[in-house]
Amino acid sequence: PILKLPMIRGIVLIFESMTLGIKSMNDSARISGDEEQLTDSELKLTIILAIGFAIGFFIVIPILTAKFLDSIEPNFVEGLIRIGILLIYLTIIARSRDMHRILQYHGAEHQTINCYESGEDLTVENVRKCSRFHPRCGTSFLLIVILVSILIFGFIDLNDLWIRILSQILLLPIIAGISYELIRSKNPILRSIISPLMYLQILTTRSPDDSMIEVAITALDAVKE
C-alpha cells in the first residue's frame, strides 16, 4: 500500500515500466525464435546502463555545458540543453527505419486506450477514428520531468560542480514523483497546460495498420480481464 501513495507511486512506476519494457522485448525475441536473448544478469546490466546514460545525458552534460558557458542563469540554460537533447534523441529514433514498426505499435496502443476511455466498443473501426496522442504517454512525462526540474533546480544555487551534479541526481525521484502526479491530474487548469505537450508524440508514434490495432485491442482486453 505504501508504494501506491502519491509521489511514491510515480517513482515505483518508472522502474517498473523500464523493467517490464525490457523483459517484454526479450520475451518477444524468444517467441519469434530470435536466439539473441538477454539473461537476467544482462537485463539488470541493461537497466543500470540505461539509468547511467540518462544521468550522463540529462544531468552531467547540461551542467558541464552551462558551467563552460558561464551563464548567469545556469538552471535555465541546463533546462534548455536537456530539452534540446531530448528532441534530438527522439528525432533520431523517429528517423530510424528499425524503429518505425515499434512506433506504429505505440500509436496503436494510444488509439486503443483513447477508444476505451471514450466508452466506445473496441473494434478496429472505432479505434482507427481515435487520436494516436495520449496525455499520459511516457514522452509527455519526460518533457514534464525536464520542466519540473527547471523549476525545482531554480531554487538550488550550488556553485560546487560535483555537489550540484549529486544534488540533482538525488532529487530525481522527487521530480519524477511530482511529474507523475501532474500527468495523472484531472484538474482542468493543469490538463490545459499539459495537453500541448502531447504533440511531442508526433516523433514517437506512427499510424498503425489494422493488424497492429487488433494486437493492441487483444492486449487491452487481457489487461481488463
Image: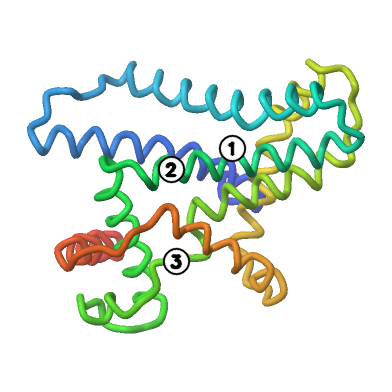
Q: Nearer the viewer, mark 1 or mark 3?
A: 1
**Image location (x, y in percent) of residue 188:** 67, 77
Which class describes the residues within 10 Å of circle 1: few (<14), some (14-19), or many (20+)? some
Q: Position of residue 35 (x, y in %)?
A: 12, 24
Residues at badges 2 and 1 in contact (C-beta under 8 Å)? no
* On screen, residue 183 above or below 69: below
Compare residues 81 and 190 and report the one nearer the observer. Answer: 81
Q: Position of residue 207 (x, y in %)?
A: 30, 64
Residue drawn at point x = 73 percent, y = 34 percent: 171
Quarter of the image with the C terminus is: bottom left
| Left or right side of 148 for 13 | left
In which quadrant of the rendered view does residue 52 lie? top right
Query: Disc 1 or 3, which lies upstream in sequence?
Result: 1
Q: Earlier in the sequence, mark 2 or mark 1?
A: 2
The label on residue 219 is: none
Of badges 3 and 2, the one in the foreground is 3
Mark 1 vs mark 3, CA separation in Å: 22 Å
**Going by the image, does 22 lie left or right of 191?**
left
Circles 3 and 2: CB atoms closer than 8 Å: no
Q: Which mark is residue 85?
A: 1
Q: Secondary structure at mark 2?
A: helix
What's the amino acid at mark 2?
Ser
Please tell me how many numbered marks the rendered image carries: 3
- Distance, label 3 to label 2, CA atoms, is 19 Å
The tag on residue 133 is 3
Q: Can you give x and y, in whole percent of width and height, for residue 133 in the image?
A: 44, 66
Q: Nearer the viewer, mark 2 or mark 1?
A: 1
Q: Which residue is mark 2?
A: 17
Mark 1 and mark 3 residues within 8 Å of each other at the beta carbon: no
At 55% from the left edge and 55% from the top edge, which residue is drawn?
Answer: 140
Q: Nearer the viewer, residue 8 or 123?
A: 123
Q: Amino acid at mark 1?
A: Ile
